[in-house]
Amino acid sequence: MTRMTIVLVATAGVASAQDASFDGLGFDGLGGGLVGSRANGVSPDGEAIVGGDDTQLGTIAAYWFEGFRFPNLLFDPAGDFAFGTAEAVSSDGDVIIGLHGFFRDGVFLQVAMAWDNLGLGVELKPLPDARPLGRLLTFPGDISNDGSVAVGVSSDRSGTRQPVTWNPATGAVRPLALLPGRSGGQASRISADGRIIAGCQFGAGGTDMLVFWTDGVPEAVDVGLPPEFERFEIHSLSPDASVVGGSVTPRDFDPFSNPIRPAIWRRGSGLEVLGTPPGAPFPTGNDMVQGISERGLIAVGTTSVSAAGSPFSATVWLPDGSVRTVADWLIDDFGLVEVGDWRGLLEATAISDDGTVIVGYGINPLGIKEAWRAEVPSFLCRVDMDGDGEATLFDFLAFQNLFDVEDPRADFDGDGRYTLFDFLAFQTEFDVGCP
């Protein structure tokens, strides 16, 4: 099994509560009931949050801007509430994608949607003559930082899943290329610049559990799945597409004794099955990595560990290789004692690109499901390439090694090439040093 190497750690010590914050995001209560809310995604800069508002009328796609105290509700093309959830949002918060359910010709269907920051929606179109996959015509996966490309799944005329991209402004759909011998697949996540899409493909000859489309060209990657596992599922992607997070399913799956496990795959080092925090295991099957910051510095997700009476817990995998529940981390390391008033932080669903903003949902002190937002100090120190917390000669050597294999962490000027200018950019940041 490959050991995950995480670089760029924070300086030692316990931060103060002034360095961090934790807030519940509220809920609308439409229809007379205070039912709850859930956060599913956060913008790359951490300023916008999307999810769902659970009202007595049903769950309505929602988003939070400026203050994060109560959700704004999203609408379908007819101007009615969008009954579903918002899943991802662009850098400036101007483009949101998610799922909307409605009745068409007496049949309940669900389709992917794109919304602007006024809450007005456009249906993301299915492929021609699509036959629903159960209730689904299309399903959203992710959106590029600039909001110009959305990815996901559309059914086709035979009712098979197909990986697609959409233009969120118009809803126009375009199929992604399939590898030889593959008849379908899924586009799950997209890099910050919109050039790389991560997903899977399948066909009579088998399944490619990890496929990267780079500028539309597909390439299957050998995940390096350990023999005791049979499947790797994608749930998250780092902004530079160098790290993929998800879960692995054991061949002898048993929810009590051999559950689904969180896992992460890195370019250059392969797959690692991750650990879980101390605590009583609970057979929920929810263990997964749901969000990854820049270059995989911090990963967040959910593990089946019972805490504060809840059957599963929001979890963070830290740069020093440790794994903690988000609640324990916020209380013990940042002094956010108010987190302890909640009855449980159930899931951490997304993280900002720089790793400073984490969102999810939990059970608040009143026993109501509520979205939450946590902000912590930045762990980012790009020149600490060997992860010892300092900028030293050894970081130059580590950078050289990464440069030689064209690892994305060595592309310091961000131009997609590996040149002298990356060394100059590294030198400039090295002279400043780590915080």
Image: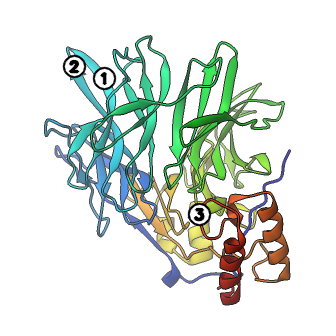
Relative to residue 137, is residue 332 depicted above or below? below
At 32% from the left and 29% from the top, the residue drawn is 125
Please state the horizontal and vertical placement of residue 72, each as a whole percent of the image.
Answer: 24, 55
Residue that carries the numbered disc 2 in the rendered image: 104
Between residue 125 and residue 66, name the one nearer to us: 125
Give the numbered dot on residue 109. Answer: 1
- Decide if residue 216 is in sight here: yes
Relative to residue 70, is residue 205 depicted above or below? above
Q: Quadrant of the N terminus?
A: top right
Q: Earlier in the sequence, mark 1 or mark 3?
A: 1
Q: Secondary structure at mark 1?
A: strand
Please state the horizontal and vertical placement of residue 304, each as a whole percent of the image.
Answer: 63, 44
Q: Secondary structure at mark 2?
A: strand
Residue that carries the numbered disc 3 in the rendered image: 415
Q: Earlier in the sequence, mark 1 or mark 2?
A: 2
Give the numbered dot on residue 198. Answer: none
Which amino acid type is marked by label 1? Leu
Q: Does the residue at mark 1 contact the one at mark 2 (Cβ under 8 Å)?
A: yes
Which amino acid type is marked by label 2? Arg
Between residue 306 and residue 137, name the one nearer to us: 137
Q: Earlier in the sequence, mark 3 or mark 2?
A: 2
Please state the horizontal and vertical placement of residue 98, each as a whole percent of the image.
Answer: 36, 41
Few, some or many residues within 10 Å of mark 3 (<14, 14–19, 20+): few
Between marks 1 and 3, how big is the CA–CA gap? 42 Å
Is residue 203 left or right of 356 when viewed as pictured?
A: right
Please state the horizontal and vertical placement of residue 239, each as a whole percent of the image.
Answer: 56, 56
At 56% from the left and 63% from the top, the residue drawn is 327
